Image (cartoon, helix red, strand yellow):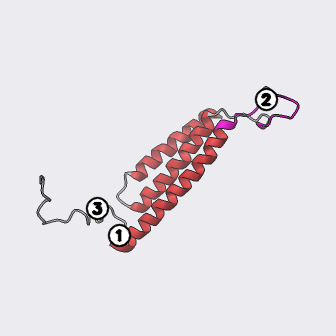
């Protein structure tokens, strides 16, 4: 199972890098979302996939039983999901505002900060 999930993580990373190298902002956003999902799956896979007892220590024991699930990857994935969602929402709003202002989602046409035909800024003071 880990082999299949590792291959899926590789596919997610390859697809996300391909999409983020695009000129269109929508593809870049989709690449960021797929990259976040790939990272979550990588953390989950690295934490060993087991179908054991939940990571809860009973009241009568001081240490966990043998063969419990590892709670650290679960906590990391939950945190990463929240961070990835917030980052994606911020990028979505930023892209929408840039599209409203500039009228395009092509990064080549978004070069308003670098106008053509003007003299370059001063190189020293």
- Distance (Cα) linking label 3 and label 2: 57 Å
- Residues in magenta? 54-72
Disc 2 is placed on an element classified as loop
Judge from the rendering whether residue 22 lies leftward or rightward of residue 13; answer left or right. left
Relative to 69, is 12 above or below?
Answer: below
Residue 90: x and y, percent?
A: 48, 61
Q: Which residue is mark 2?
A: 64
- Distance (Cα) linking label 3 and label 1: 9 Å
By secondary structure, the bulk of the magenta-drawn segment is best described as: loop
**Residue drawn 41% across and 52% down?**
20
> Is residue 59 magenta-colored?
yes
Q: Which residue is mark 3?
A: 108
- Distance (Cα) linking label 2 and label 1: 56 Å
Disc 1 is placed on an element classified as loop
Judge from the rendering whether residue 40 lies leftward or rightward of residue 14; answer left or right. right
Disc number for residue 104? 1
Residue 103: x and y, percent?
A: 35, 73
Relative to 57, is 110 above or below?
Answer: below
For residue 85, what is the image quadrant? bottom right
Judge from the rendering whether residue 97 lies leftward or rightward of residue 73; answer left or right. left
């Amino acid at each position: 199972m880990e082999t299949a999930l590792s291959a899926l993580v590789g596919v997610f990373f390859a697809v996300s890098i391909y999409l983020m190298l695009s000129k269109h902002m929508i593809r870049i956003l989709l690449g960021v979302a797929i990259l976040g999902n790939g990272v979550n799956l990588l953390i989950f896979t690295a934490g060993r996939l087991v179908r054991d007892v939940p990571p809860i220590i009973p009241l009568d024991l001081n240490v966990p039983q043998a063969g419990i699930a590892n709670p650290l990857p679960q906590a990391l994935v939950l945190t990463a999901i929240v961070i990835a969602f917030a980052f994606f929402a911020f990028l979505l709003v930023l892209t929408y505002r840039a599209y409203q202002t500039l009228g395009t989602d092509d990064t080549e046409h978004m070069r308003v900060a670098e106008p053509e035909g003007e003299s370059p800024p001063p190189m020293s003071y």
